Image (tube, rainbow, N blue to C red):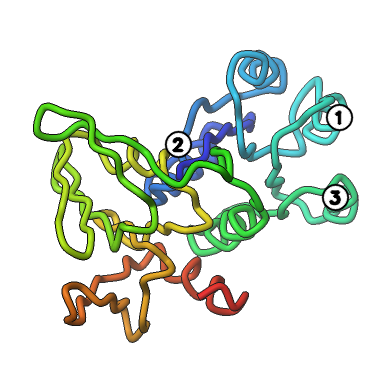
Amino acid sequence: MSYKVLIVDDEPLAREILESHLESLDQFELVASCQNAIEANDILQKESIDLMFLDIQMPKITGMEFLKSLTNPPEVIMTTAYSDYAVEGFNLNVIDYLLKPISLERLMQATNKFIAKQGSTKFGEEDDFFFVKADKKMIKIHFNDILYIEGLKDYVIIKKNDSRVITLQTMKSLEAKLPDSIFMRIHRSYIVNINKINAIFGSMVEIQEGGKPKNIPVGKNYKDLLHDLIDANKL
């Protein structure tokens, strides 16, 4: 599953740093990068945003003022060069408060908090399947039948215990069809069924495939999220 992101910051360099960091995190899709609250408000009227990176000190309308003005705001991660506003920010129920310059490691800590907070998916709980086009027909895939999904350029391979389905689409588009309560992106090229993981060691997860262990690599940008699930006893 991917999340739509909005950046709001009057400093071009600060926006560039966030944009660069987000390119490393495949779970997040940058919808727009705005230099003030007025531009951001227009985007929020047109787009469904899941997470907003909001600078506090901006001209005309500050980040705090803008957030207070929203009747139905997205989840927010505050960014600033100053630490004086942390208490007020958390009083507004923001996910996290990042001090500039923002490192990729610190950004990942904040986005992992956001992901952990998401208690629901974009799909109804009654749905336990989806359809993909393969071999000139629409094939029904049950979530529980999937062991893992592998990306290969413009194709994805959906690996089940006794078969596989190859479909022409991107990993990102397929990920959007999967409930994050069951599936996790652990690598740029792999999504795994959490319930099928038997073991985790080093930078690998082990899944039983055809009665034999299958080791799948964990990308460095996904390790923290995986260990958050372990700590929460969800694996």
- Give, as a three-letter code, the residue at label 3: Tyr
Q: In the displayed structure, would residue 186 be above or below residue 233?
A: above
Residue beneath disc 2:
29
Q: Earlier in the sequence, mark 1 or mark 2?
A: 2
| Mark 3 vs 1: CB contact within 8 A | no
Q: In the displayed structure, would residue 22 be above or below residue 168?
A: below
- Nearest the camera: 55 or 50? 50
Residue beneath disc 3:
85
- Give, as a three-letter code, the residue at label 2: Glu
Q: Position of residue 97 (x, y in %)?
A: 72, 54
Q: Residues within 10 Å of mark 2 (few under 14, many from 20)?
A: some
In space, the residues marked 3 and 1 are separated at their CA atoms by 12 Å
Q: Position of residue 127 (x, y in %)?
A: 50, 41
Q: Earlier in the sequence, mark 2 or mark 3?
A: 2
- What is the count of numbered marks? 3
Residue sitting at x 42%, y 39%: 176
Q: In the displayed structure, would residue 149 be above or below residue 60?
A: below
Q: Is residue 124 left or right of residue 214?
A: right
Residue 70, picture quadrant: top right
- Give, as a three-letter code, the residue at label 1: Glu
Residue sitting at x 53%, y 32%: 12
Residue beneath disc 1:
65
- Nearest the camera: 173 or 213? 213
Looking at the rendered structure, the secondary structure element under dot 2 is: strand
Looking at the rendered structure, the secondary structure element under dot 1 is: helix
